[in-house]
């Protein structure tokens, strides 16, 4: 290699003119969020796979004398989880405008709805009508619910912390971009639940 | 993006003042505080590698005890119960605490340097990953020393590992250790993916990305599904044992085969998680020792990707003896044989590279040659095992032990040693001794073959694996003695290596920045690299950035020197996209890892650990992410941002 001689026609790329806050897939945090969604999505898919595998071993589903799960409360929970996407979607829009008041408002509402869903989830567990240690069917449905619930609980806490940051004087532009990533994660959680709901609550009626 | 930036008059190289400021900005605190709080990927990865080698040594001592026990028939050195713990902890340790972490750690050290980045994408998370790994490893070894070592084999098959046949805490240790290490592995995977895709130096398009980085990227993409699988499966096992679920309990509708499916859907890809980084080492090293680029760059990259996909479609070949459907057996035989195709393509590309190169017979290169011999033997016995009738014959015999060590040592350890000899000067600024290195290599090559070749014959002669002793008169004694002698030769070889590292780290010949006159970016900065890696992000003009560099290469200026800032580029074309603040050192990942450990260890005893463990974990996580007070009031800052 010849030594690196500086020649007068070298180009200079000045990156100081580039932004330091970006949204969506340009940002690192977005990629990290997607990475963790992939990990958690796999985990939920494994729970679903375990459920379906165990199904093939049983003559009846749920095995007698276990009753079908109830539908009322779980359907309400599902609706709440899907409705939650509205405030988060609005928070995301406000964040992209750097509208502090809007972000605050919609994050508070979103977190509150998330908390409500978590409370309802407790009743979803009752609605299963089976204990985890009754039979393999019970183990399967509890695994799916507990796996998703632990993600929900973590998410409620995280979302609460992000909301809290927006009420301090420590907000930085990058937090607005975090709001968008949170909104994306909320979509993942709700859609994942939609699929698990179909499997766990409607599955026994059709499988 | 560069198109929209007008060319400016020539800039000077990073000047002394700039470099001094960078050094101040990126410095760690001194002493213990700096040691616990660092978020420098190099310090953390070096720690990972040293810890992994420490576990390798412990696992080796464990193996020596086993081999000594098997030296002669009816030996009484260790009894059956202790032997069960020894082989289980040896296998578990070598796979989960040595081979996978060491490969990912090599990636965590080298990927940022090879792509011209200042750090990994999420430095604090990276620190968390290390501490969690360390504590998980300690758990396993403390358990073994206190006679609570897992004893159901490294794949812990149910029902043996279930609540009925394995009361006590031994298997719980295994299940929780898995969770620790898999969390750490998953974190490393996310780091590697995002660093490779978003932190590449300007000009390093995907087409110019080094093969080693491709290998680590592909590996990281395999880690996500496979390690998630084993982490979930091991929790299912733990729940069967702790709270009475029935996933694997036939009596209540569960199924032991479900465990085998889950385990091997992770377990086979795991072999490639070890092997693909090793192929990356070979591709990274060959140019320096053959003085030419790797032949068939694209073919090698595509082969890695193909291997990764096929790697998830062969797991049932571990289950041929379970009475699986005939059709399924044939299918998985076919995929298992098919997966040799991409590997063969890579091997042929390397052979052409070597054939047409000007060779330099360094220790590093010798280890690559050793890889060819050893790995090919392991690969051939693998093709034999893929055939169902043959597998039925030697299943659970020493033939399998021979096969798996040829694959793992040939396909993992040989390239790893080659890589250590190659990159040691980059890490320390000093060369490893070539004379000691050649001794290390010779002993290693002899030792490995002496230990494991006779095991093929033992297996064919019907000696089962996992037996603590054997009767006289079976015709097994001679080959066992050879194998044991070989194990001691391996031990000598490892001692030579350790001695070499310790001596050379202090006394070795000074390396200079680029002792091998290599082609890739890591050699474009000082050895060892400064905490910020590169004073200015390099600009890449070809696949061999240092060889292809022209005197009028553009320079990147304008990255902050008074605060930690990194350059983020676009995923495909690596065009400069934005600047991103890199986090400061912090103690919270360490504290969080302690909380995680308390959580998981308590979970071996009570399900309520979920509640108080989370409560314990919450404060450090909040403290970790809690922002510092900025200079401006909220709402006033409108970032200088164009449209998204
Ligand atoms: C360095 C020298 C090594 C020696 C002398 C050695 C020796 C042994 C021995 C004696 C066994 C027990 C065989 C039995 O009783 O069935 C064993 C099992 C095993 N070894 Fe090694 N080993 C070495 C390195 C490694 C490495 C580097 C790895 C992985 C990367 C590894 C992975 C395994 C596995 C997975 C098992 C199976 C454990 C089980 O049956 O559950 N070994 N090894
Ligand atoms: Cu396999």
Image (cartoon, helix red, strand yellow):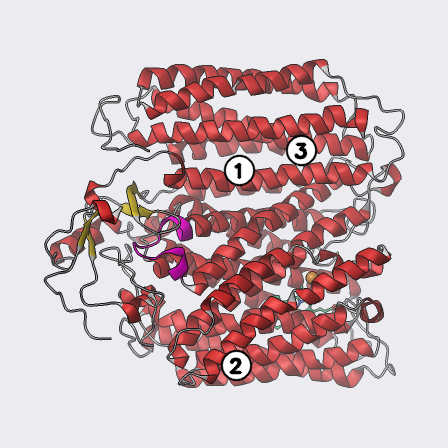
Q: Do the dots labelled 3 and 2 sit on one chain?
A: yes
Q: CB at mark 3 closer than 8 A to ligand 1?
A: no
Residue B512, position as x, y percentages in the image: 26, 74
In the image as oriented, which residue stretches furthest toward the front?
Answer: B3
Looking at the figure, which quarter contains the C terminus of chain B? top left
Q: Residue drawn 15% across and 51% down? A: B7
Parent chain of label 2: B
Asked if residue B27 can be seen in this view, the reply is yes
Asked if residue B367 can be seen in this view, the reply is no
Relative to residue B231, is residue B415 depicted above or below? below
Q: Residue drawn 40% across and 83% down? A: B434
Discs 3, 1 touching: Cβ within 8 Å: no
Is residue B197 part of the magenta span, yes or no? yes
Parent chain of label 1: A
Residue B57, position as x, y percentages in the image: 55, 68
Label 3: which secondary element: loop
- The magenta-colored residue range is B195-209
Quarter of the rendered structure image containing ligand 1: bottom right
Mark 3 vs mark 1, CA separation in Å: 25 Å
Q: Residue drawn 55% across and 46% down? A: B183
Give the labeled residue for mark 3.
B607
Label 1: which secondary element: helix
Give the labeled residue for mark 2.
B369
């Amino acid at each position: 290699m010849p030594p690196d001689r500086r020649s007068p026609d070298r180009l200079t790329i000045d990156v100081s003119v580039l932004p330091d806050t970006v949204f969506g897939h340009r940002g690192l945090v977005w990629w990290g969020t997607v990475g963790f969604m992939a990990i958690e999505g796999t985990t939920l898919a494994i729970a679903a796979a375990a459920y379906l595998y165990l199904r093939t071993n049983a003559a009846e589903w749920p095995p007698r004398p276990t009753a079908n799960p109830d539908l009322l409360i779980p359907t309400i929970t599902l609706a709440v989880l899907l409705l939650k996407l509205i405030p988060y979607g609005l928070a995301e829009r406000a964040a992209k405008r750097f509208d502090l008041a809007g972000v605050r408002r919609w994050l508070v509402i979103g977190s509150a709805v998330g908390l409500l869903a978590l409370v309802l989830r407790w009743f979803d567990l009752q609605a299963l009508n089976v204990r985890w240690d009754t039979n393999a069917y019970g183990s399967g449905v509890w695994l799916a619910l507990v796996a998703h619930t632990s993600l929900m609980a973590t998410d409620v806490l995280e979302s609460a912390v992000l909301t809290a940051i927006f009420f301090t004087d420590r907000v930085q532009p990058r937090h607005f971009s975090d709001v968008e990533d949170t909104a994306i994660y909320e979509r993942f959680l709700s859609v994942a639940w939609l699929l698990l709901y179909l499997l766990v609550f409607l599955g026994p009626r059709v499988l | 993006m560069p198109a929209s930036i007008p060319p400016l008059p020539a800039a000077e190289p990073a000047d002394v003042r700039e470099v001094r400021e960078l050094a101040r900005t990126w410095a760690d605190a001194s002493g213990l505080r700096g040691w616990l709080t660092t978020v420098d990927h190099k310090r953390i990865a070096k720690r990972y590698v040293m810890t992994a080698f420490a576990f390798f040594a412990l696992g080796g001592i464990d193996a020596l005890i086993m081999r000594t026990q098997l030296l002669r028939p009816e030996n009484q050195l260790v009894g059956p119960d202790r032997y069960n713990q020894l082989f289980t902890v040896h296998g578990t340790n070598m796979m989960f605490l040595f081979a996978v972490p060491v490969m990912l750690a090599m990636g965590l050290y080298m990927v940022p340097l090879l792509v011209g980045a200042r750090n990994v994408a999420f430095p604090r998370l990276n620190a968390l990953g290390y501490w969690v790994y360390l504590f998980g490893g300690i758990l396993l070894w403390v358990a073994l020393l206190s006679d609570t070592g897992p004893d159901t084999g490294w794949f812990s098959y149910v029902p043996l590992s279930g609540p009925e046949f394995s009361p006590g805490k031994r298997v719980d240790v295994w299940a929780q250790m898995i969770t620790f290490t898999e969390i750490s592995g998953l974190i490393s995977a996310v780091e590697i993916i995002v660093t490779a895709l978003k932190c590449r130096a300007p000009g390093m398009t995907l087409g110019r990305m080094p093969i080693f980085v491709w290998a680590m990227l592909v590996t990281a993409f395999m880690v996500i599904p496979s390690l998630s699988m084993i982490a979930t499966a091991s929790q299912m096992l733990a729940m069967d044992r702790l709270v009475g679920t029935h996933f694997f309990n036939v009596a209540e509708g569960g199924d032991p085969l479900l465990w085998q499916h889950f385990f091997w859907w992770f377990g086979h890809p795991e072999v490639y998680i070890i092997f693909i980084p090793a192929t990356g080492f070979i591709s990274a090293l060959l140019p320096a020792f053959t003085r030419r680029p790797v032949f068939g760059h694209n073919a090698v990259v595509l082969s890695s990707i193909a291997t990764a996909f096929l790697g998830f479609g062969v797991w049932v070949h571990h289950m041929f003896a379970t009475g699986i459907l005939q059709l399924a057996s044939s299918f998985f035989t076919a995929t298992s044989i098919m997966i040799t195709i991409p590997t063969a393509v890579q091997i042929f590309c390397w052979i052409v590279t070597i054939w047409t190169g000007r060779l330099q017979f360094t220790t590093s290169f010798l280890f690559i040659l050793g890889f060819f011999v050893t790995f090919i033997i392991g690969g051939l016995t693998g093709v034999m095992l893929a055939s169902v009738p043959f597998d039925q014959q030697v299943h659970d015999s020493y033939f399998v032990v021979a096969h798996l060590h040829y694959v793992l040592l040939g396909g993992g350890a040989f390239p790893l040693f080659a890589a250590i000899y190659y990159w040691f000067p980059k890490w320390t600024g000093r060369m490893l001794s070539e004379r000691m290195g050649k001794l290390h290599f010779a002993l290693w090559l002899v030792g490995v073959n002496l230990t494991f070749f006779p095991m093929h014959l033992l297996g064919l002669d019907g000696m089962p694996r996992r037996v603590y002793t054997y009767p006289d008169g079976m015709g097994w004694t001679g080959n066992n003695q050879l194998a044991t002698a070989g194990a001691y030769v391996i031990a000598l070889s490892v001692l030579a290596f350790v001695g070499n590292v310790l001596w050379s780290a202090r006394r070795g010949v000074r390396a200079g920045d680029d002792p091998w006159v290599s082609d890739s970016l890591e050699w474009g900065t000082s050895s060892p690299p400064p905490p910020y890696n590169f004073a200015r992000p390099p600009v890449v003009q070809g696949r061999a950035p240092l060889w292809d560099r022209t005197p009028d290469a553009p320079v990147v200026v304008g990255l902050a020197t008074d605060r930690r800032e990194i350059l983020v580029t676009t995923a495909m074309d690596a065009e400069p996209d934005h600047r991103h603040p890199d986090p400061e050192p912090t103690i919270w990942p360490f504290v969080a890892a302690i909380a995680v450990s308390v959580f998981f260890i308590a979970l071996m005893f009570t399900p309520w650990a979920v509640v108080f463990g989370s409560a314990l974990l919450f404060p450090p996580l909040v403290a970790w992410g809690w922002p510092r007070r900025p200079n401006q009031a909220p709402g006033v800052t409108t970032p200088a941002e164009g449209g998204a």
